[in-house]
Amino acid sequence: MMAGHREPHFLQDDRGFYTTSYGPFVLRSAFQPIFSQNDQGHLTIEAFEALIRAQQDGKPVSPGHFFSVVEKADAVTVDTLCRELHILNMGKLGRRKAKLFINFNPGLFDNVTNIDAEVDRMVEVTLRAGLRPGRIVCEITEQGSGDERVLDRLVNGLRSRLFKIAVDDFGADDSDSKRVSELKPDVLKFDAAWVRRFTETSAGMGLLKLMVEQFIERGITVLFEGLEEDHQIEFCQKIGVQLMQGYALARPEIVPRTFDDRFPEPELTQVGDPVRPYYEPAPRAPSQPAAPTSDFVPRPPLARRAAAFGKRTR
């Protein structure tokens, strides 16, 4: 068990990225790119989703197992620890414009005082990492959201400090529509399995297109995740989805470096305007093997087999 609320201890590896620990577990950040696509199909990285990677005795441990053994008294501390680790590593990544998606579970906080302290810590670590709050997108998870006052305090506190808000796993039932109306997110992530069902019929695809258009008209950025085949990416382009994420584009990678090689940031002029706004996708041929510390698996040649939108275990 961690000792109360002592300050977290972060170490830098030989590449400058941070690690930390909880009990016998060594914790590292993995980032999965989130892409935009222009009318010609050119891709650029707009953001990363932060994921935790744990090791025990030098062997990988699944995120599900790691979080299942976190003691209840340490849940908030570990939740905060993971966010701070990801933000510090985003600062070391050196991307000047890409955003970072991190998770928030309001159900872990039992009063508004704790929420205020957490938001203050978020501001502090974000500035320490050399980032602006506007580059951090806070995904509000539905599980155990608990006291509505805590949820409101969290969202309003983050928004007042200029952090962005995202709603995850949108499925368009009554509770999901209510979440969007109440939270007024900047980004809406569509549930991958729910999208799969709607893509099975032409009527369903038409409804998805209409929903995407309506959310964009409301000023909400739409993100489809769980993309595993090229035809799914083409479908996103067809219906106007702004952001895309999935194994068909790029897998998560621990403290990534190769993303910069395959998808470098646009060069900036002296006044900060992009010179080249988009980049060609990586060649279809397999790339060089990734470093041993990476989760990255080179994208295979173009595949057209039917496959569902769906999340893989990460």
Image (cartoon, rainbow, N blue to C red):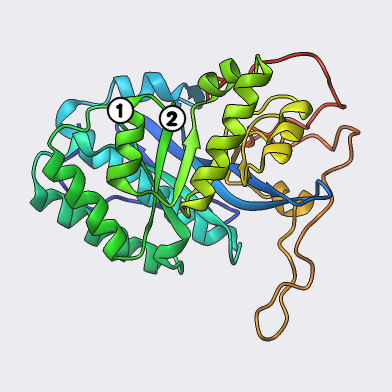
In the visual, does 129 lie left or right of 293? left
Task: Name the front one of labels 1 and 2.
Answer: 1
Measured Cα–Cα span from mark 1 to mark 2? 11 Å
Q: Is residue 148 above or below residue 184?
A: above
In this view of the protein, which residue sits in the foreground, 278 or 296? 278
- First of labels 1, 2 by sequence position: 2
Which numbered dot is residue 175?
A: 1
Residue 143 placement: quadrant: top left
Residue appearing at x 43%, y 31% in the figure: 170
Which quadrant of the rendered structure holds the N terminus? top left
Q: Looking at the picture, how far across and down is residue 260, in whole percent?
A: 72, 54
Question: Dot 1: few (<14), some (14–19), or many (≥20) neighbours within 10 Å?
Answer: few
Residue 79 to residue 43: above or below = above
Write down the residue under mark 2: 169
Q: As shown in the figure, which amino acid type bears the numbered disc 2? A: Asp
Q: Where is residue 23 shown, x and y percent of the image? A: 29, 32
